[in-house]
Image (cartoon, rainbow, N blue to C red):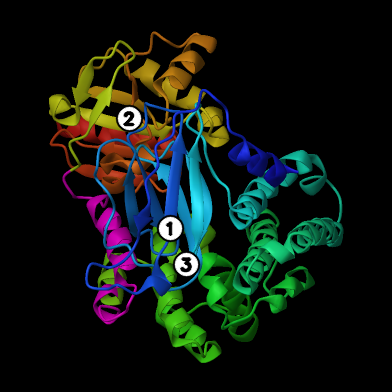
Amino acid sequence: MVFTKDIWFISAKAESMKYIILLISLTALVSCDTKSELNITTETDNTNIDSIYITESITERIITRIALKGNNLATNTKVDSITIGQIQTKDGKQSYLTILRPTKDFKICIKSDSTIATNNIGDSLLNYLWKSNNEFIAKNSSIIFGSISSDSVAELFNNFRIVRKEKIDKHADKLTTEERELLHYQNDARVYSFLFYFGRIVKNYPPEDDFFQFSENINNDTNWAKTLPQNLLYKHEINYLTSFDSLTSMSSFINYMDSQTRNKDLLAFLKAIYISEIIESPSYWERHQKLFNSVILQQAIDHEKTNTYSELITKSAHSFFSSQKGVKAYNFTAERIDGSQIRLNELRGKIVFIDSWATWCGPCIAHRPRVLELAKKYENESRVEILMISMDASKDVWSKFLSKMNQHGNSGDLIIENGMRTMYGDKFNVQSIPKYILIDQFGVIIKSDIAAPSKAVEDMIERELSKM
């Protein structure tokens, strides 16, 4: 089992391992409440990582930074209640889920290959739920997306859910009551999350379809819903559309959620996530996105300014506004294959088409030939620049892909390592890829939500050329 392997590694003591022990009491500076302390010990044999971060998954707030070198210890890091966190390296390339709860005492281990784990069985089970979900879908993709009935798909995932439940129960005596509840919720929620995707996006079933009956198992008021809130939002959408046939406005949907939710803290969080989701994942909220624009967003910001979770809206709104038509494009820096750099401002006077992609992105690879055709068409047009900016976390992975495809000679191929997590991703609202952007000769965004490289893109470029 996945979690058994993790626990074995952490308990093993290799003679060559270098220990760096940091005992960190994570408390607010103004408080000495030991009931809210986390006691963390770190152990590493990787000298390339100087620090790790622990963030709260719900709000993405940084709980603490743990320095693995020197004496920079974390402070002001009180944890008041149980929730899910993420331990990650500074560059975000390695991450590990953890259950954060007051009085938790655990060890974080960084392996020689930079992977992260802890010695806590609850954490190991949480990561098992996360990773096994993706593995199960990949293993059964031909069945899931084949010709079997929707009932069979639902049954397949329900059996999978039961198997994982039994694994959680096997370790019940090593878990607190709250940890068990959280893990059981995560088990159900991760299965339901895929079923919602399958029914809403893949099959496009109508809201009243019996396939969505599983949504009635989702509690409208549990705080655990904050650990995977999209499921509850999907449930409310299905019930709303079943009751009212069509969506008339975003505010009417928010009012509906209000009528279905007694837990006011959860309601505040759902409203913030709902608005953020429309910005960050528009393809999942097509009905809602059609009713959405800059004016509606500003109204939502003003209306929710007293919302406890308003920062979640503000963060997404910042990316939305900075990537809109007519806004001066962010002056990013990208790297060429030879290590030299280029800034967007250096291309002033040219029309710039940008393909944000990655080697691990299937749709990106599928569309890449069309982007290369576009680059070929304009290779002798000095007023047009076609940039293909990789979002890969590793320059080496990107370079090997280009070599394998015999595409090292493309002058427009660039990389911004881990670009979706950088200022580039933030300023251009790169929440998913591929993402195509067109910028005019003055460095102003013409369009940042282009569906795909097509004849329509060529027409836009030609129109801009005619103005020059």
Q: Nearer the viewer, residue 55 or 247?
A: 55
Q: Residue 332, percent across and down?
A: 21, 34
Q: Quadrant of the N terminus?
A: top right
Dot 3, how many residues are within 10 Å of its Cα: few (below 14), some (14-19), or many (20+)? Answer: some
Q: Residue 110, percent across and down?
A: 48, 36
451 w.r.t. 152: above or below: above
Which of the two labelled residues, at mark 3 and mark 2, occupies the earlier sequence position?
A: 3
**Residue of label 3:** 103
Q: Which residues are magenta?
A: 301-328
Residue 410 lies left or right of residue 288; in this view the side is left
**Residue of label 2:** 416
Furthest-front residue in this view: 15
The answer to the question of whether label 3 and label 2 lie on touching residues, with beta carbons closer than 8 A, is: no
Which of the two labelled residues, at mark 1 and mark 3, occupies the earlier sequence position?
A: 1
Q: Quadrant of the C terminus?
A: top left
Q: Amino acid at mark 3?
A: Thr
Determine the CA span between mark 3 and mark 2.
40 Å
Q: Residue 367, percent across and down?
A: 51, 30
Label 2 SS: loop
Instruction: Let me know if residue 199 appears in the view.
Output: no
Residue 161 lies left or right of residue 368; in this view the side is right
Q: Nearer the viewer, residue 298 or 70?
A: 70
Residue 320 lies left or right of residue 452; in this view the side is left
Magenta stretch encompasses residue 322? yes
Residue drawn at the location 24% of the way across and 77% of the way down: 302
The answer to the question of whether label 1 and label 3 lie on touching residues, with beta carbons closer than 8 A, is: no
Residue drawn at the location 28% of the way across and 40% of the way down: 424
Determine the CA span between mark 1 and mark 2.
36 Å
Label 3 SS: loop
Q: Amino acid at mark 2?
A: Ile
**Residue of label 1:** 39
Residue drawn at the location 55% of the way across and 36% of the way down: 363
